[in-house]
Amino acid sequence: MGDRETSNHSDMTDFILVGFRVSPELHILLFLLFLLVYAMILLGNLGMMAIIMTDPRLNTPMYFFLGNLSFIDLFYSSVIAPKAMSNFWTESKSISFAGCVAQIFLFALFIVAEGFLLAAMAYDRFIAICNPLLYSVHMSTRLCTQLVAGSYFCGCISSVLQTGMTFTLSFCASRAIDHFYCDSRPLQRLSCSDIFIHKIVSFSLAGIIILPTVIVIIVSYMYIVSTVLKIRSVEGRKKAFSTCSSHLGVVSVLYGAVFFMYLTPDRFPELSKLASLCYSLVTPMLNPLIYSLRNKDVKEALSKLLEKKKSSGSFFPFYK
């Protein structure tokens, strides 16, 4: 009887991650693809943080934000990738209730924090281009630290609300999550509860998070474009736009994938998985490449770092 109770308890506390609906022969290929992408994420983001921390020329607000962006990308991809890769080799594909809660909480925390951080980076570029003489005054160490801390705080509040709402639902007999990680939308499909109010609250919360960050980014770039167009020299315009192109590329990839996921109907779960794959793994892989390939300072710092063969063990850059 004790064994039976234990079994029932396990059934009620474990979930099954269905993952991608492909033939078993493709699991090895998908594992290798995930492994390659995750290795590039680790190499790119750890390398970016090392470059920023070891080169004094990069002790500026822009690179302070970029260092935190790399940390966020590294962390939330690590919440998803290892478990997804291990499931390609296991039959059960199970994840504990606590593990599922942790995935939703941590992923929501860092993905929301990234949205607010990208808005802070847009404001930084706005000040740098539109008010260059007052840049050091406006973008002080204190303000930069507050903007980063505020990003993490907003991410934490949003994550607590999202996770709390998700796990107040009652789940039916099926524990199979049609996704490659724990996410609130596929979990809603398993619920026996009335999820209408839950969906309204979730949509409202997403709007509260996305709209302010998008507005800040759009308004910042409207002022930036207006200022750049007033520059008479073609070389000056190119230089001004080049400082923003990397950030704009990162914003486009992330928000494009997020909007695609939210606009995809529930009856097309495979499309939602592809969109989730873009912003959970592809975006963290591309961000260091975008910033390193489009940034002369990062290229020079990387060359200097490779020449001196330096390494660093801290996660956050500090600047004067």
Image: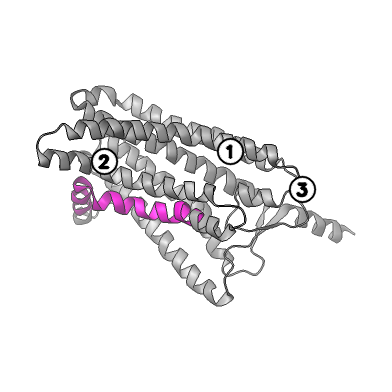
Residue at point 24% right, 35% down?
225
- Is 72 or 221 nearer to us in this picture? 221
Whether tag 2 and tag 3 are in contact, CB under 8 A, the answer is no
Residue at point 49% right, 31% down?
153
Q: Which SS class for mark 1?
A: helix
Residues drawn in magenta: 276-305
Question: Tag 3 or tag 2, which sits nearer the N-term?
Answer: 3
Name the disc covering residue 190, or none.
none
Instruction: Inspect the image, locate mark 1, and give the three-letter code of the amino acid beneath it.
Output: Phe
Quarter of the view holding residue 166: top right
Quarter of the view holding residue 201: top right
Q: CA distance from mark 1 to mark 3?
A: 20 Å
- Is 264 or 162 nearer to us in this picture? 264
Residue identifier under label 2: 244
Q: CA distance from mark 2 to mark 3?
A: 47 Å
Q: Which SS class for mark 3?
A: loop
- Is 194 or 4 nearer to us in this picture? 194
Quadrant of image for the C terminus: top left
Question: Tag 3 or tag 1, which sits nearer the N-term?
Answer: 3
Residue identifier under label 3: 192
